[in-house]
Amino acid sequence: MAPALTETPPTAPHKLNLSNVPLDIFPDGLKTSGQHPPLYDQLRPFEDFPEEITGPTVWKAEDYKNNPERWTHRFTEEEIEELSQTADKFIASHVPLTGISKANFPLPKLESFLLALKKDIIDGKGFILLKGFPVDKWGNHKSAVAYMGLGTYLGYFVSQNSRGHVLGHVKDLGEDSKQIDKVRIYRTNARQFFHTDNGDMVGLLCIAKALEGGESDIVSSHNVYNTLYKERPDVLRTLSEPIWYFDRKGETSKGEEEWIRTSVIYLEKGENPRVYTKWDPYYVRSLTRFSDKGIIPPLSDRQQEALRVLEETAQRLALHMILDVGDIQFVTNTHVLHARTAYTDHAPPAPRRHLLRLWLSVPEDEGGWRLPFADSFEKKRGGIQVDNQPPVAPLDAE
């Protein structure tokens, strides 16, 4: 039987105490908080949502399409040298990569740029393309160290799957993309529809490109919101209701449900709340193994319509970009949706398309959005944490 929308969720997942974790498991002393249902009493009805969103988070593709200088930064020789020297020192220290932090990866010259960038990603346009990371010269190990070290200035890395990967690898491993109830799409070459990841921002470092495809699209979800409010307010209303079930694909801790019920768009806590979007169509379409048995409701006709309209609107308003080798894309998950086209790899022995991925969190008391979730103040909020699975940072896909 499906739970009622007014029921009180179990309290156990909300009793979080992640401040005293074993250092032999979590080297930096921080544990990913993982996936949890929202605090349902803090979700607001559609009548409370704004008629229009304004400010720097609302942008159009034409604002940037012909002005790459507004959303790209090429690393200078001095910046690369600082990253290189600091990475070499970190490697020589033998600290595990899962223990990297701002404290042990000092970047005094880059720090002011990165802190301004963090502010723009969180509260501004929400994306950047960094160019000129010398991955071919450095190789995967040093590139990963420098990349994660740079990432510590933007947020705290969180686990991306049940195996504790805090350094992810977007690479086709030959898994069947049609088995969406089991397979994570980033491990295939299939198209990824517009979605957000389970952290405050996501980073992608291009190590190798595909023969064809695998190109990136992003869109301001606040521009999508404004467009839908004018064209299809009924769709926005559907997206604001906590009737959406998101699959956890078996990546659960003991005693947790296999899904999370939430809304797609919701408001921040407190005054002057902003509209947050949490979305991935693969995760709401993959629950038929439960809905067919009547355990949860199937997607209704109006939900199916909302799925279609949201994707079509995002496609219509999107900014297209191509990541070259050595490019790093950082995108917020609060107010930007991202997608990628399907791709075809080069024939062996050429390397397959390969991106190093970071999921980064920014807690509420460090400038992150005020989310209606119990872990809003946790440093490593979000992500995927299964029991006490240790964090790992593999240097290739596994």
Image: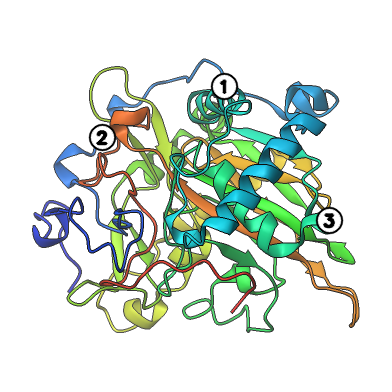
Marks 2 and 3, the one that precedes in the sequence: 2
Considering depth in this image, is 131 or 61 the residue closer to the camera? 131
Marks 1 and 2, the one that precedes in the sequence: 2
Query: Marks 2 and 3, Cα distance to the nearest angstrom?
Result: 53 Å
- Residue 165: % across, % down: 48, 67
89 with respect to 66 (left or right): left
Q: Dividing the image into 4 quarters, which one contains the N terminus?
A: bottom left
> On the image, which quarter does residue 125 sit in?
top right
The residue where tag 3 is placed is 137
Q: Amino acid at mark 3?
A: Lys
Q: Amino acid at mark 2?
A: Pro
Marks 3 and 1, the one that precedes in the sequence: 1
The residue where tag 2 is placed is 45
- Residue 139: % across, % down: 76, 62
The residue where tag 1 is placed is 112
At x 20%, y 69%, the residue is: 2
